[in-house]
């Protein structure tokens, strides 16, 4: 076979550096396609090698005709890796030519995973936060804290960020990053200071089956939008009861996490899927008082709408390694 | 990340050239592990881009602790490709370090798919064919015809093969290949001549939802073992009724193909899963008169037990391209 395959390492994908505004808009377009049923995205199966089932490697396939994208992300999460100096998340994404099924690219998937997750939250926020949102609280200042700050800054006229992390060094890194975005960043020493007074609150700590439930009722101001990157780990039962609109990116997958995996036990009923907000089947925010929540889980669609942009730019910029198939 | 990834093209994997006897034995070991419940193999999801759903790209993940193998095969089948001079089957296999989740290799999956499918049939035959089987009929002399001849020749004292293909050029290729194995090969001009008088019959044509049902009752001799690589496409209802032991490699997947996808409509009830033959939970052939059938579907486990052998040999022989992750 004289077919060629483009390999893009993490450094290559980073060098392509698709801007966050394009990622947000592409992910939003993906949710629109999803809302109209114009994509194929089967449930993601996984394997769980070792560590009592805490490790996972998931296959996330999707076909999105509108952007001529077909492929799979094969992504692992090993909680014990960080203590060994290895990344928690690793993996590869394979992109295929949808017309022939033949693979055209293999790329590291960690950059895309970090960026598209922030982008999906920003899409949720576009429908559920107040448009004039200017202050954001970030609890958990790791990779997702960074990409969420970046993505929210694309969609909203942010001026100020409150950064909380149990490890102040992480909050310091986020502050520096926020400064590069032109934001004023306060490193705060209690979670409440990154919640009360904020228009947008992003909780991005470790995902826990038994929530530490730090955030109490009354901490969120009226009119706040909350993005729960770490599921419900940060929220007490009473704080969750304050939700006016509780949303997710995929209802079936959310129900699975709730019923089979034991997450989201204290959470309100789902108001809408994000795709239904994007297509207008359900209204988003309807007044300035609502406290709206997004508990997004991460979808193969999000990866697969971004991957072709990376591939095309890499080809155009002559980035990556060409291999024989 | 300073992690390294080994890329193996089709030419690389072919050059590694793991011998068929090792593949057969490794696949058998995999079925033993499966029979004891010592592996993780979730259902394989897929996407179906274009051609009215005839195209597929499947994700096939598996974790087989006994051989320290974790990974996924992402394999496409596009029936229309051959008319365009492109391969029907293409795809890649990702192998991970099960201890860290980090990918260690990406390889073309077409060699492994061809070989392990033949090997799995040979494992079925080891339990269901007569040990002295000397004559094999091959109907459909493409890739699978070749690897099945090779694999059966590892397990049985074959002397003669009967080769039938609607395209005589394919049968000619198989004859040449059979000669290299030391076999006497007759190219025959009717399907019946590749069935009657044979100890082992392999049907490896295109998979059809509406079987052409060429093989009639009475064609198979008593004592024959039949491997149905193309499902039940080749067999008439009455020929299927002659089965004494009807087996498959995965009962759940077989039921899915039967109930949801519409294959195997005229087939007998399942006698045993191959893994139950390998572990001895169910007896295999019990006399010289039985007509025994294997309708194997292909499992991720089969790929994942062979892939680490290829990886290790490639490392040892310095084959392939090292990439940064």
Image (cartoon, coloured by chain):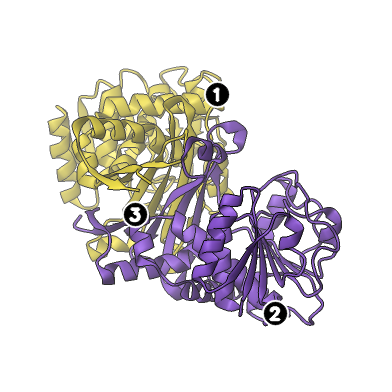
Chain colours: A yellow, B purple
Q: Residue at x 35, y 29 (%)?
A: A122
- Residue at the image position 63 percent from the left and 72 percent from the top: B160
Q: Judge depth for marks 2 and 3 and give the one in front.
A: 3
Give the label on residue B9, or none: 3
How crowded is the residue under tag 3: few (<14 C-alpha within 10 Å), some, or many (20+)? many
User: Which quarter of the picture shows residue A103?
Assistant: top left
Disc 2, SS? loop
Q: CA distance from mark 1 to mark 2?
A: 49 Å
**Marker count (numbered):** 3
Query: Does residue B266 appear in the picture of this structure?
Result: yes
Please tell me which residue is depicted at 76% across the width and 46% down the height of the picture.
Answer: B212
Mark closer to the observer (3, 1): 3
Query: Residue B81: x, y in percent?
Result: 51, 38
Q: Is tag 2's residue or tag 3's residue first in the polypeptide sequence?
A: 3
Please give the residue where the numbered disc 2 appears in the rendered image: B281
Image marks 2 and 3: residues in contact by CB distance under 8 Å: no
Are the two marked residues, 1 and 2, in contact with CB atoms closer than 8 angstroms?
no
Which of B140 and A59 lies nearest the eye of the viewer? Answer: B140
Pinpoint residue A126: horizontal percent, then vertical percent.
38, 23
Residue that badge 1 annotates? A36
Residue A110 rendering spot, x and y as whole percentages? 30, 46
């Amino acid at each position: 076979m004289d077919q060629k395959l483009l390999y893009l390492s993490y450094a290559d994908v980073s060098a392509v550096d698709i801007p966050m505004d394009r990622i947000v808009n592409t992910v939003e377009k993906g949710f629109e396609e999803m809302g109209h049923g114009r994509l194929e995205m089967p449930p993601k199966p996984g394997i769980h090698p070792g560590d009592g089932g805490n490790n996972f490697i998931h296959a996330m396939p999707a076909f999105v005709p509108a952007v001529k994208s077909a492929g799979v992300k094969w992504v692992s999460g090993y909680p014990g890796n960080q203590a060994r100096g290895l990344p928690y998340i690793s993996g590869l994404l394979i992109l295929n030519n949808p017309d022939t099924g033949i693979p055209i690219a293999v790329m590291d998937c960690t950059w895309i995973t970090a960026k598209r997750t922030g982008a999906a939250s920003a899409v949720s926020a576009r429908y559920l936060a107040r448009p004039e949102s200017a202050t954001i609280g970030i609890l958990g200042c790791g990779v997702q804290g960074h990409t969420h700050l970046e993505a929210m800054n694309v969609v909203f006229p942010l001026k100020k960020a409150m950064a909380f992390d149990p490890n102040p060094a992480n909050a310091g890194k986020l502050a520096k990053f926020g400064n590069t975005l032109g934001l004023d960043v306060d490193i705060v020493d209690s979670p409440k200071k990154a919640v009360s007074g904020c228009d947008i609150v992003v909780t991005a700590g470790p995902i826990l089956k038994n929530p530490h439930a730090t955030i109490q009722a009354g901490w969120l101001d009226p009119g706040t939008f909350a993005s729960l990157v770490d599921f419900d780990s940060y929220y007490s039962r009473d704080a969750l009861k304050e939700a006016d609109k509780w949303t997710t990116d995929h209802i079936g997958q959310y129900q699975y996490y709730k019923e089979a995996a034991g997450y989201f036990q204290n959470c309100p009923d789902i108001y809408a899927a994000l795709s239904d907000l994007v297509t207008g089947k359900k209204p988003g925010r309807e007044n300035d008082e609502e406290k709206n929540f997004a508990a997004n889980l991460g979808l193969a669609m999000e990866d697969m709408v971004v991957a072709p942009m990376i591939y095309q730019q890499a080809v155009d910029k002559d980035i990556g390694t060409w291999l024989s198939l």
